[in-house]
Image (spheres, rainbow, N blue to C red):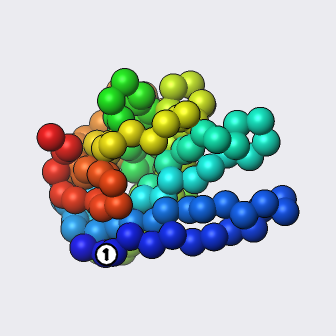
Amino acid sequence: MKIAMVRWLVAGGAWLAVAAFGAGVSASGGAVSVSDVKAEWKKKFGADKDKEWLKVSFTATVVEKVDKFVYPKLKVSCGDAADEVTSMTTKFHELEVGKSAAHDAFVFFDKGEALATRPPSCTVKFGYGKSTKKDDFTAIGDYCISGTSVSDGACK
């Protein structure tokens, strides 16, 4: 597991703290596998500068050929806050079997709103499915974001 780190970024003349953490754990389900999951809590700008959103980065590998319009999907729950995100960085059907692509998913929660308070933990359910069908979700695996770590399995 990687040690937590804090990076300082300059944005619009203000310094922002970005906590980054990750783990080298991986999960596989069906035609796609996920590895190298990392998460960063980021502060919003402007009037909502005290609110945070979550960036989840990961590597997805095509294990078996997939249909067109199939993308990674994430279901993220942090207590009462939840969001579903489709990462459209790479079209899986364009990747050869065995090839990987890096992805970023931006989780804003509750209809695009960032969170006023960072939750103690969040469960990220990774899956994949057709972007044209909201309920099309084949599960790959779960990860828990807790404090400064990402671990395999749903949060308890």
Residue matched to label 1:
2
Q: Is residue 71 above or below residue 34?
A: above
Secondary structure state at the residue bearing disc 1 = loop
Measuring from the top left, give residue 6's x and y in whole percent. 51, 70
The image quadrant that residue 137 belongs to is top left
The image quadrant that residue 64 belongs to is bottom left
Q: Residue at x 53, y 35 (%)?
A: 115
Q: Is residue 125 left or right of residue 86?
A: left
Indicate the quadrant containing the C terminus: top left, top right, bottom left or bottom right.
top left
Q: Is residue 141 left or right of residue 6?
A: left
Q: In front here: 65 or 88?
A: 88
The image quadrant that residue 80 belongs to is top left
- Can residue 129 be seen here? no
Label count reads 1
Measuring from the top left, give residue 40's x and y in whole percent. 48, 59
Disc 1 crowd, CA 10 A, few/some/many (<14, 14-19, 20+): few
Measuring from the top left, give residue 73's x and y in whole percent. 39, 44
Q: Is residue 13 above or below residue 78?
A: below
Q: Is residue 42 left or right of residue 68?
A: right
- What kind of residue is marked 1? Lys
Q: Residue at x 67, y 60 (%)?
A: 16
Q: Is residue 130 left or right of residue 30?
A: right
- Can residue 79 be seen here? yes
Q: Residue at x 46, y 65 (%)?
A: 20
Indicate the quadrant containing the N terminus: top left, top right, bottom left or bottom right.
bottom left
Measuring from the top left, give residue 113's x and y in whole percent. 59, 30
